[in-house]
Image (spheres, grey):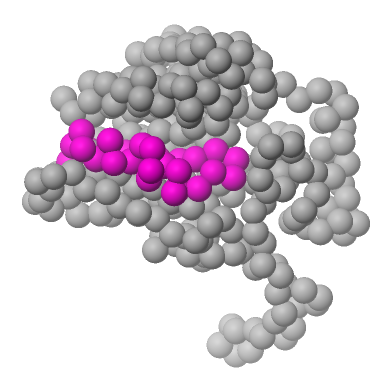
Amino acid sequence: DIWSDGTRMSGDLWFPDGFRKDTPRPAILMTHGWGGVRQHLNSQYAGKFAEAGFVVLTFDYRGWADSDSRLVIIGDQPDIGPDGEVTVRARAIREVIDPFDQVRDITSSLDFLAGEPGVDVNRIGIWGTSFSGGHVIFVGAQDPRVAAIVSQVGYQGVGLTKERRLFSRQRAIDKARGKIDPIPQGIDGVPRLSGTPDLAKMVDYRPIDWASQIRVPTLIIDVEDEEFFDRRKNGMAAFELISKNTQANYKLFIGRHYDIYSRHPSAATALALEWFETHLMQ
């Protein structure tokens, strides 16, 4: 159980063979993208990183898979009792993609991992894929506990059209004025992707604006024919900014977005492992 702003998230800790609490080991926090869940990370990645000698933490964002829902009060807030408690009717918030909430969940998971006996708090890496490939840039630029980064096929917040930006701004206005639910569910869906994107939150989310602040070794993995966004303005641009201030590498695989999971998982994982072994095992 990992607590993030008062809501319980589900996570899994993976330990390497021979792990002892009195011998600190490097650790990796693995974060999924959009509506991805830890089951995929567990089946495809986490075990390989643990076998290589790392403590690994995977988790589900609030409102996804096994993690609890955030709750929003229905109707007016009732009077508050002397002990600070209230009795309310509430709506469970499930499967909403809010980048700032996801970043909060990542930070809470870092807090959890840093408190795990046997974890070397000076050797924590963070790995993110797809939408969270931007999250790890955003977090890594601001959280001094992050000692190395791998960002895989990550969206860095560049590419909204003028029409989409105006639409997202209107969503923010409608939320603030109570014309739509304050946390939207079941609208603005994206083909082939699960959940509801909170467009009002996404419109100003640009991890690339933080890339120049990164001072730890960073590996960016992209695919040549990325179809969801322009990789040159996202991953490649982030790499160019990061490489001015620290060791960085940019690796390009052939194919489209999901090919990183179906065609190149072994090669991409090997690259990430080599990166973390070089920068966290020394």
Residue bounds of the magenta highlight: 25-53
- In the shown orientation, is residue 31 left or right of residue 269? right
Q: Which of 28 and 78 is in front in this view?
A: 28
In which image quadrant can residue 183 be found?
Answer: bottom right
Identify the residue at image location x=43%, y=59%: 10
Asked if the stretch drawn in magenta spans residue 269, the answer is no
Identify the residue at image location x=53%, y=35%: 132
Asked if the stretch drawn in magenta spans residue 49, the answer is yes
**Residue 263 position in % (x across, y down):** 46, 22
Identify the residue at image location x=13%, y=53%: 21
Rendered-image quadrant of the C terminus: top left
Q: Can residue 119 be seen in this view?
A: no
Identify the residue at image location x=65%, y=84%: 86
**Residue 83 position in % (x across, y down):** 56, 88
- In the shown orientation, is residue 268 left or right of residue 17? right
* Relative vertical location of residue 43 with respect to residue 265 in this rendering, above or below: below
- In the shown orientation, is residue 270 left or right of residue 72? left
In the image, farthest residue toward the bottom: 82
Q: Is residue 194 visible?
A: yes
In the image, farthest residue toward the front: 263
* Relative vertical location of residue 218 with respect to residue 107 in this rendering, above or below: above
